[in-house]
């Protein structure tokens, strides 16, 4: 019979051994819901950007030099919905990922 490692010898899962490498891991693949931003409703409060735990809300300056949410980094967005829940004007809607099938486009509407 093969010798198996004991619990003290098994490495701990979920450990980040080297900082600054989050971009190397695309974690959006397990998302069930996708945030879709209605840029016409967005008022540029940046709450979605501030609250996003994955830094997946990308910003852009509009023609008046105000920041607005304009896209979702779908490679890293896990679909938690925090962005939609903190949006004061409900400019972000969470939609089922199955609505997009093989669509690799941004979370911009």
Image (cartoon, helix red, strand yellow):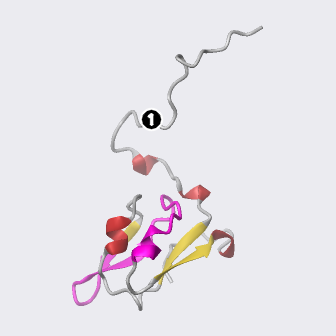
**For the point 49% across and 38% down, which residue is it?**
14
Q: Is residue 57 above or below residue 88?
A: above
In percent of width and height, residue 40 lies at 41, 91
Q: Residue furthest left?
A: 65
**For the point 60% across and 76% down, which residue is it?**
95
Res 46 quadrant in image:
bottom left
Q: Is residue 58 visible?
A: yes
**For the point 46% across and 75% down, which residue is it?**
84
In percent of width and height, residue 11 lies at 51, 25
| Region in magenta | 59-86
In percent of width and height, residue 70 lies at 40, 78
Residue 36 or residue 81, whichever sits in front: 81
Element under label 1? loop
Circle 1 residue: 15
Counting other residues with Cα less than 10 Å from the Cα at mark 1, is it few (<14), some (14-19), or many (20 or more)? few
Q: Is residue 68 above or below residue 64?
A: above
In percent of width and height, residue 26 lies at 51, 52
Q: Is residue 96 left or right of residue 38?
A: right
Q: Is residue 25 magenta?
A: no
**For the point 60% across and 56% down, which residue is it?**
30
Q: Quadrant of the N terminus?
A: top right
Residue 97 or residue 26, whichever sits in front: 97
Q: Is residue 105 visible?
A: no
């Amino acid at each position: 019979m093969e010798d198996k490692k004991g619990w003290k010898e098994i490495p701990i899962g979920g450990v980040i051994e080297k900082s600054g490498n989050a971009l190397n891991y695309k974690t959006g693949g397990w998302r069930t819901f996708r945030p879709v931003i209605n840029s016409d409703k967005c008022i540029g409060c940046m709450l979605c950007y501030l609250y996003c735990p994955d830094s997946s809300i990308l910003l852009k300056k509009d023609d008046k030099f105000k920041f607005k949410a304009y896209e979702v980094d779908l490679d890293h967005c896990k679909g938690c919905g925090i962005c939609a829940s903190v949006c004061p004007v409900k400019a972000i809607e969470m939609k089922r990922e199955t609505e997009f099938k093989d669509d690799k486009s941004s979370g911009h509407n």
